[in-house]
Amino acid sequence: MGNLASTYWNQGRWKEAESLEVHVMKARKETLGANHPDTLTAMGNLASTYRNQGRWKEAESLFVHVMEARKETLGASHTRTLTAMANLASIYWNQGRWKEAESLDMHVMEARKVASGVNHQSGINLQESRKVEGGKESGSAC
């Protein structure tokens, strides 16, 4: 079911993807618990679908949960936690919440620099994507 949702998502069929993702997330919550890695992945997938539909509050709620759970279980500098932070920052960015987005983005870039070196491509990509998304520069160069 998750694979079919992913196929719909990749085709831009948001409502169909959402329907399946909600089902997958609920099933995983019931069987595995709210903070199980597979449940968190399902939540992140649904949040991404909400983001693509411009449903910022719904996406934010799920991304916050995913980020907090990942921080608690994996630590603040783990790659999955950093991805969750970057996803939440994208929501803040799209809502015009520049300072909150910048704070998370800076944490992500700094943690990735420490883990992978000063010029790690993911940090550069994150910075460049924020310039394009908002038409406004934010943060400092990596």
Image (cartoon, rainbow, N blue to C red):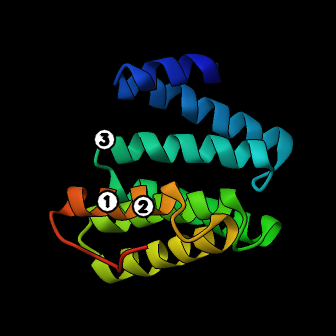
| Residue assigned mark 1 | 128
Image coordinates of residue 106 in percent, x first then y, are: 46, 78
Q: Residue at the location (22% across, 73% down)?
A: 137
Of mark 2 and mark 3, the one earlier in the sequence is 3
Question: Which residue is at the front of the view, 29 or 133?
Answer: 133
Q: What residue type is labelled 1?
A: Glu
- Note whether residue 98 is visible: yes
Q: What residue type is labelled 3?
A: Gln
Question: Which residue is at the front of the view, 32 or 89?
Answer: 89
Q: Do the residues labelled 3 and 1 touch (CB within 8 Å)?
A: no
Mark in front: 2 vs 3 = 2
Numbered mark located on residue 124 in the image: 2
Q: Residue at the location (56% across, 35% down)?
A: 22
Quadrant position of residue 64:
bottom right
Q: Which residue lies furthest to the left in this view?
A: 135
Question: Quarter holding the C terminus?
Answer: bottom left
In the displayed structure, 30 sits above or below 82; it is: above
